Image: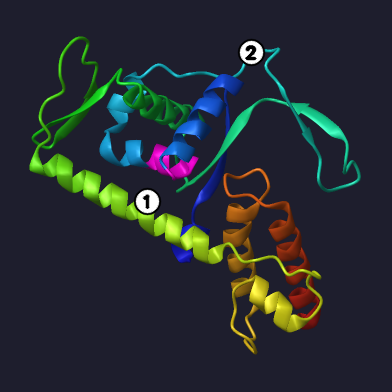
Amino acid sequence: MDADVKKHSYTIPCSSAFRDAVANLARRKKANVADLARSVVLVLPAAAIAEFPDPGEPGREDRETVVLKSGSAQGRPWRRKPRLQVRLPPGHEVAMIRRALGIALAMERGEMALRLDGKAMAAAAHANQAPPAPSPEDGRLLRETREELERLQAIVSVLAFEPLRDGVHTRDEALHVLGFPPGRIPDLASLRARFRMLATIHHPDGTYGDHRRMSQLNAAMDILRRGMA
């Protein structure tokens, strides 16, 4: 849990076409957008990512309409830049994450191939050339990446609780929604850490977002916080 709490949620402005292409790739790979970016960042050196052209922000006319789900303006439409939400450790630049996702798309389209040269790794265009045969190190990296994706998917599956049919009304129901065992008395710091972790997964704007789950998370947090007053 501590590792998740230390991660940062990045908003990545991008064209709607780029956003849709990345989301579709993540869906086909049964991963999320952060998994795609992380796989590139972990394998390629920063210098190689920096050399890739930044896909850039959306044009002035490229906007999406969303309906606000909270606050005084709830229910009203809002025009905003298309975007992707990516949760990664702090310290990354938005343009670098966008480049990493661009590299993932280019590799999927066959426009780039990963070449491992000893300890140095680089992405190289392979125009009219067959990519080199995978080395044992390539195979190890692929296996580790696949195992990590399967682990992340299993975690999401476990955390994706079934929303309570009648909503959250009791302390035990609130504990259940936040993933604490019955009778547990978590302190405020533990509550906040658990809420942040789950909200990152279930927020409606995220890949695995769900409005009912997010609403019940908010209700559960409110009930347990009031019980501490």
- Residue 3 versus residue 67: which sits nearer the camera? 67
Amino acid beneath label 2? Gly
Region rendered in magenta:
30-38
- How packed mark 1 is, by other alpha carbons closer than 10 Å (few <14, some 14-19, many 20 or more), is some
Query: Which badge, 1 or 2, is on the more N-terminal residue?
Result: 2
Residue at (74, 57) in percent of width and height: 212
Residue at (81, 40) in percent of width and height: 68
Residue 201: x %, y % from top left: 58, 54
Q: Is residue 229 visible?
A: no
Residue 60: x %, y % from top left: 69, 13
Q: Residue furthest right?
A: 72
Residue 187: x %, y % from top left: 64, 80
In the rendered image of this protein, does residue 4 appear above or below residue 17? below
Residue at (87, 44) in percent of width and height: 74
Q: Residue 177 sits in which quadrant?
A: bottom right
How far apart are labels 1 and 2 at the CA level? 33 Å
Residue 128: x %, y % from top left: 19, 9
Residue that mark 1 sits on: 149
In the rendered image of this protein, does residue 35 appear above or below residue 185? above
Residue 7 part of the magenta segment: no
Residue that mark 2 sits on: 59
Q: Residue 162 sits in which quadrant?
A: bottom right
